[in-house]
Amino acid sequence: MNPSIGSLPFEITPPPAGGLGCVIEGFDLRRTDTETAAVIKRLVYEKKLLVFRGQRLETEEYLDVARRFGRPQVYFQSHYHHPEHPEIFVSSNVKENGEKIGVAGTGRFWHTDYSFFDEPLSTTMVYPQVLPRGRKTFYIDMERVLASLPDHLRRTVEGRKAFHEATYYYKVQPWDIDKAIAELMEEFRRISPGAVHPMVIRHPVTGARSLYVSRGFTTRIMDMPHEESRAVLDELFAFVERPEHIHAHVWEEGDILYWDNRPLIHKASEVAPGDPSVSFRIGVYDGLPFHDDGA
């Protein structure tokens, strides 16, 4: 029997017509026990994006909550790590005691987390610590996109695979001074060579099928001539990123977002020059295959 939310202290607000996910109010994530964690996981698979309002968690409490949903990731590049908790990926333009913490300006392009590795991130939690003015995160539901693809694009992506890589988004660090761009790219490709994934995946829990590509990380279609691959991807991305497909979450103090990376791609909004911004991300592996091979 699937977990039910009926007996739990959730107040769930659905989005406006055509929106994405749901808002959960009146629930302190620190109260998450085994039963509640199972319910929340089922809910994130069904709704894709959960917004928990009014949270006031210390850093250790936030990490403890994430562990109840699965195994937190330790990102493969250590300069993104929280200084005390490597499971926390830090996006920050604010120094602490004069020291640079994490990396500024992350994720401002359409992507799904860690698709450039063989084991992409199942789910993601984000908890801003310092909110800049008007911060938003944008999402596209790729299950809906697949369902509305023009026939010629659908025929093209069905049964095909694509290559994902992150080389062009490498963040140059102080220790990279005096290195040539070609050298930096070669070094990065050694530690992050990229990964091949189906262009259409089936969710291991819901069985729903989603398009699995993104402008940020999907660079070519396998077994297709380069020029044709580039033309197809350009047309595909233009369709995916149509305004009617985009859901914008406007952040409020105390928000924690939790989403399923299988059906969603996302990107962060820009931050105005001079605005402080600090955000803690935890990628959580849920213990399930990323997709059902029967896609």
Image (cartoon, rainbow, N blue to C red):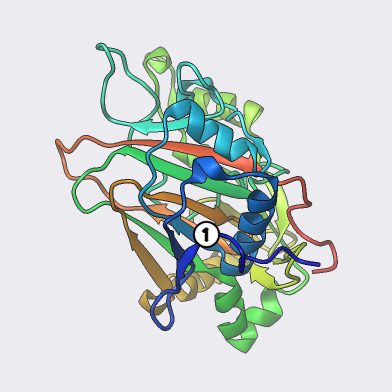
Q: Which residue occupies the foreground of this view, 190 or 79?
A: 79
Which residue type carries mark 1?
Pro
Instruction: Tell me if residue 106 can be seen.
Output: no
Residue 125 falls left or right of residue 177: right
Q: Which residue occupies the foreground of this view, 105 or 156?
A: 105
Instruction: Tell me if residue 1 can be seen.
Output: yes
Residue 208: x %, y % from top left: 70, 73
* Quarter location, residue 180: top left
Which quarter of the figure is the N terminus placed in?
bottom right
Residue 59: x %, y % from top left: 44, 28
Category of crowding for the residue at label 1, using alpha-carbon neighbours closer than 10 angstroms: few (below 14), some (14–19), many (at least 20): few
Residue 84 falls left or right of residue 197: left
Mark 1 secondary-structure assignment: loop
Which quarter of the figure is the C terminus placed in?
bottom right
Residue 112: x %, y % from top left: 55, 53
Residue 249: x %, y % from top left: 35, 61
At a point 64% along the width and 40% down the height, the residue shown is 68
Residue located farthest toward the left when viewing the structure as drawn: 274
**Total numbered labels placed on residues in the image:** 1
Is 61 located above or below residue 215 in the figure? above
Residue corresponding to mark 1: 9
Is 29 located above or below residue 23 in the figure? above
Residue 107 falls left or right of residue 159: left
